[in-house]
Image (tube, coloured by chain):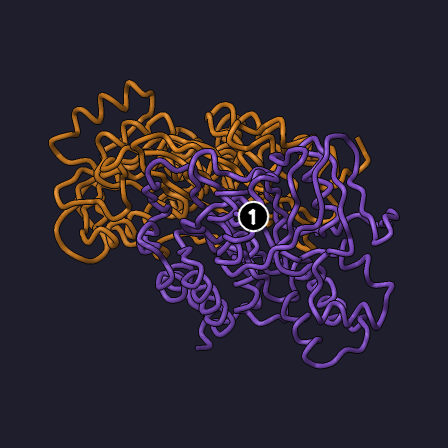
Chain colours: A purple, B orange
Amino acid sequence: MSERPGEDDLIARFFAPLAGPAGLGLKDDVALVEPPPGRDLVVTTDALVGGVHFFVDDPPGAIARKALRVNLSDLAAKGAEPLGFTLGLVLPDDWTAEWLAAFAAGLGDDAAAYRCPLIGGDTVRTSGPLTLSIAALGAVAPGSFAARGGVRAGDRLYVTGTIGDAAFGLLQRTGKGPALGEADRRWLLDRYLLPQPRLALAPVVARFASGGMDVSDGFVGDLTKMLRVSGVTAKIEMTRLPLSPAASAAIAADPSLFPLAATGGDDYELILAVPAAATAGFEAAAATAGVAVTAIGEAMAGEGAPRFVDQEGRTFKFARGSFSHF
Amino acid sequence: MSERPGEDDLIARFFAPLAGPAGLGLKDDVALVEPPPGRDLVVTTDALVGGVHFFVDDPPGAIARKALRVNLSDLAAKGAEPLGFTLGLVLPDDWTAEWLAAFAAGLGDDAAAYRCPLIGGDTVRTSGPLTLSIAALGAVAPGSFAARGGVRAGDRLYVTGTIGDAAFGLLQRTGKGPALGEADRRWLLDRYLLPQPRLALAPVVARFASGGMDVSDGFVGDLTKMLRVSGVTAKIEMTRLPLSPAASAAIAADPSLFPLAATGGDDYELILAVPAAATAGFEAAAATAGVAVTAIGEAMAGEGAPRFVDQEGRTFKFARGSFSHF
């Protein structure tokens, strides 16, 4: 396994086994996709750079899975079902066949688990760090798309899962976090390494949500962005922000970390706006889908940043609204 | 213009003006595409790395245009009409607003000229060289897709335009080519810098071609690959290989350069297979579309690399079948 195959051999050996029918065995330059009749297409793309979005010494399979999952998270936020993805694989000079085999194995596992086959790609070399650019296609029924700009005054605002774990995981990874029990530490590290795209919720989003966005750059900043694009504001009850036991333990150890939970990046949870009349149906459907959702506030007519309030109704101020990978 | 905007400002300022309706003003994370009814989708992606696929000191607009054009060339080879593209823009630390303005202007010019609007993207930073990853979507009528593996024994083989110009242009650029008149030198340099995607021929490809591929890694190597995937071989008359006056001048100055014309990369012309009964219709339609096509040989039953023969029927041997960017 130590020889280094050329581009065609590399594709045939590592990636062709992952290809769906639309990928034409990765023997063509392109994919041929028969779009599901009567559906709109959702197209998303995310680029990840070694040393910026992941550590270059992360397990290769985890790097591959994160690259795919951050794109799947965007599809989930829109209520879209995945159709397939292309991979732009930009390899540094020191790649090895072993590394690539592990990368492809992780990618294949997730492509199968999330039913999002590889349909095409391009493999090139760089003098810089490993860079991955994935474009994912999804399908959504016309009118069901949950736009970032779709939030309306009166909508209830929800988040999925728990917020802040990835930012705390990154702290643990870089040795800057508080001392924690091993189980909590592992949980947080894993949440940074492997986002959980909420695709199981996509049909529920399509059916109930008026607006949706995934949280990649921090809850506070991304929510603010979503409300601005929607032309509304909101009141958010920060005591309702869902925290994992591990994140709660970190905040208990160092209460000054709370703002980081609300503003740190890489959550890949969803912020969803649901019309008030539909909340019961939404919550029941989310429970059936097995995805935790938490009501955290309400969208309101008006402009400007949302008000983040504590238990006593006092306004939180965040020194730094969001994390940017850019 | 010397301040450096953040990611959202950068998108709003430079890229949102280029967005088609499916791009949702680049205010969402995704694009929403209504697929043309009754058409299949063609998806292609190409990544370009500074120092590998272009010179980092090339004009920014030309870099942008090349990145889009190499994708459009893939759509043309399949007979597909462009629908839009996403851009993964991986910027090195030394980017400037001036550079980005020129890059976006070039990209916008080509997006308009080829009717292929920007529909989404992602902008990230790298410690390495500028890297561009574009995914383009096209549409083709079911059954009209010109597959790489679609060549059948008896098909006539054609190439568009002229072959070898880009390889000779790269020689001129790096100071290794023969001395040429200024007009020839400029032509070759321009052919390396700016591929000409043969999109005007796409409807003709869809109507007449049984197989298609664009020449990115050299005529000899790419044709060999296309025939192998199709399970046929071919006899190619190398004296019919279409050469531009500038390429002919270069070969006249240094006859040892002929193999480079046939094997060098970056032509972005098309190799097309046309059933023998359809050649007259194909040639007439290509003439109407304004794209030069040249018959260069015939596909035949059998395996193995094609035979490249000269005027006297002697077989050419190429030391190096193709150029690889990888």
Q: Residue at x 38, y 29 (%)?
A: B199
Which quarter of the figure has residue B146? Answer: top left
Q: Nearer the viewer, residue A152 or B92?
A: A152
Query: On what subunit does the disc labeled 1 rest?
Result: A
Mark 1 residue element: helix
Residue B168 x/y as whole percent: 46, 40
| Front residue of B41 and A237 | A237
Judge left or right: residue B144 versus residue A116. Answer: left
In x, y percent, where is residue B169? 50, 38
- Tell me the residue at 55%/33% (across/down): B23
Res A247 quadrant in image: bottom right
| Residue under label 1 | A280
Does residue B176 show up? Answer: no
- Packing grade of label 1 (10 A; few <14, some 14-19, many >=20) is few
Q: Which residue is found at the position 85% from the left and 48% from the top?
A: A313
Quick check: B155 left or right of B126?
Answer: left
Q: Residue at x 35, y 35 (%)?
A: A38
Q: Position of residue B247 (x, y in %)?
A: 41, 34
Quadrant location of the N terminus of chain B in the rendered image: top right
